[in-house]
Image (cartoon, coloured by chain):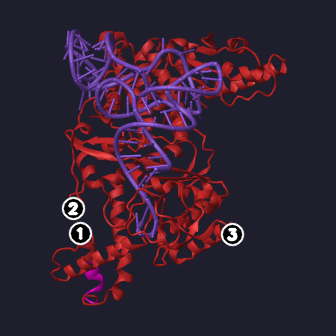
Amino acid sequence: MNIFNTYYKILETIIANLGERDQLPKGLDLKNVTIEPPRDNTHGDISTNIAMVLTKQARLKPRDIAEMVATEIRSMTDVKKVDVAGPGFINITLQQNIIQSEVSKILKSGKNYGRSDIGQNSKVNIEYVSVNPTGPLHVGHCRGAIFGDALASLLSFCGYDVTREYYINDAGGQIDTLARSAYLRYKEALGEDIGEISEGLYPGDYLIPVGQNLAKKYGDRWLNADESEWIESIRPFATDAMMDMIREDLSTLSIKHDVFFSELTLHHNGQIEATLNKLDAKGLIYTGVLEAPKGTKADDWESRPQTLFKSTDFGDDVDRAFKKSDGSWTYFAADVAYHYDKIGRGFTDLIDVWGADHGGYVKRIESVVKALSDGEVNIDIKLCQMVKLLRDGAPVIMSKRSGSFITMRDIVEEVGKDVVRFIMLTRKNDASLDFDFARVTEQSKDNPVFYVQYAHARVFSVLRKAQNTFPDIDISLSSLANADMSYFTDSSELSLIKNMMNWPRFTESAAFAREPHRIAYYLYELASEFHALWNKGNDNLDLRFIIDNDKEKTISRLALIRAVANIIATGLDILGVEPVTEM
RNA sequence: GCGCCCGUAGCUCAGCAGGAUAGAGCAACGGAUUUCUAAUCCGUAGGCCACAGGUUCGAAUCCUGUCGGGCGCACCA
């Protein structure tokens, strides 16, 4: 329980007591009450808007309510001062020892500091990456992969029961293309001259080993055979190979999924039909004719009766088709069945992470989840905007035709996993992001990854140095937690501690908003405050962490900076970045 | 034509389950180095939060409209 939640509970009690004494009406709604640090730290440590929120309900002036509540808070031993300010804010200043002792709490909690139970252990399914198994991952996939992975960690840190899932699009036309492309490489492996790879097939070299393995396993039996003889076997063989490659790509970024869900199984086991029957029973399916959209060049528009889902009942722009003109299922039909499967597995929240180019698909999936769960299951679709790759400020040109695509692996190899992960999380998901190779590898404060890492490393540098000066001190978290915290009296030290007290609020609000980038920003700020304190020691020797002739003071300072490092490490852990102890 | 996202300092962006005087970094200018890693820090300057209405005690934040930029618009995935 963090201090702000504690004071929220205290406010609840105070309002209830005032109600009992008939100073305020009973049963007031505290929903919009906030309790947070004031923007201006000269106002105190904790601030609440409770008086303004209650003014209408209680039919009293905000300042009158504020005075009543302030009087109650003043009597608490942990509280040094309570002021009523502005339109009716209540500002609380805590006793200094309450602030100081937080360091001990942080050290005792270790990596659990900032954990929250707001998730109530509810089951969340987060689906991300879900790239077609037809080739290696490229840059575009990178951001969604990292975003989804970090969001999953964040939610899990905040008490949700998270399942990380990958939907394998292993059905449909692109898998036939994959199989044909692999077949070509198979012939090549058996010594045939395949010449130029024709337009409609995948030209990438990554299929060469697949062809070789096919030749190894099946020999020359299909060399002159008709497609109908080999395609059934090559499809799964090639998809498996692609998925192995994708998993390997993902592992370079430390991304792992709990569940890989195959689209093909939905086609084979009748789940699509079953799901559609379910929608039909709700009266949400009909046969109709769609009109061509205006303003686009739909020259080949074929007006025909189709099986349609009434997604317009749920806010979609048009009703959506389940069958293609050749009678096979649309991608949407299978996706409906997939989401129904997820609903059936008991998740209360579904999160899908997609590229922004799939934005037009959002409403129909939201519609379907509403329809199939009777509004019981939440669906939140997070779109990740484009990443612009730059090299020294100039855009990196990528062309599909020449095959000069930058893959995810290329990037990881060039700048490292930690840099890629951190940088991808320095923007909110729905804003586009520039990724400049030169900038992200720069070793300066210009580069947030470096800056945060450097703060962590600096702490450990001090710890090492301190052990040289005082060889017998114990720098473990549990031992430092017992240090004498009353040494923290300088404004920079206290403000650093207050900043750390905010960490639990940040994790909660980041999880609530489902925005892992807030963690990155918090860490940058914490690192900045730490660097500032460090430099204050250059001017004022008494503020240094290691005081040569004062072991006790040194130990308490080590406790402080160890707490900083602990939070940085915890935050980086959520982002999937390794904290370094030396640079 | 319609839908979704974005518009905040010269540049790149935070802040948005409404809250007090709108924040950071870069760039510019002026300072700190016999340093616990200066790979850092301190200071100055810089704003009609795109525009116009509305809701509210209170709006960068919520609603409506306009303008500007991005993405998408049966049957592909």
Residue ID for mark 3 = A281
The region drawn magenta spans: A212-221
Tell me what residue is drawn at x 59 percent, y 74 percent. A273
Tell me what residue is drawn at x 24 percent, y 51 percent. A413
- The red-coloured chain is labelled A
Q: Return the x and y of residue A197 as percentages of the image width and height.
A: 20, 73
Sequence-first disc among 2 and 3: 3
Instruction: Describe residue B16's horizontal placement relative to residue A62 as left or right.
Output: left
Chain name for mark 2: A
User: Label 2 is placed on what type of residue?
Assistant: Gly
- The purple-coloured chain is labelled B
Q: Return the x and y of residue A378 as percentages of the image width and height.
A: 60, 51
In contact (CB < 8 Å): disc 2 and disc 1: yes
User: Label 3 is placed on what type of residue?
Assistant: Ala
Does dot 3 land on a helix, a strand or a loop?
helix
Q: Which image quarter holds the C terminus of chain A?
A: top left
Q: Which image quarter holds the N terminus of chain A?
A: top right
- Find residue A203 and name its label: 1
Sequence-first disc among 2 and 1: 1
Does dot 1 land on a helix, a strand or a loop?
loop
Magenta stretch contains residue A215: yes
The nearer-to-camera label among 1 and 3 is 3
Nearest to the observer: residue A407 or residue B51: B51
- Find residue A403 and name its label: 2
Does dot 2 land on a helix, a strand or a loop?
loop
> On screen, A222 above or below A286?
below
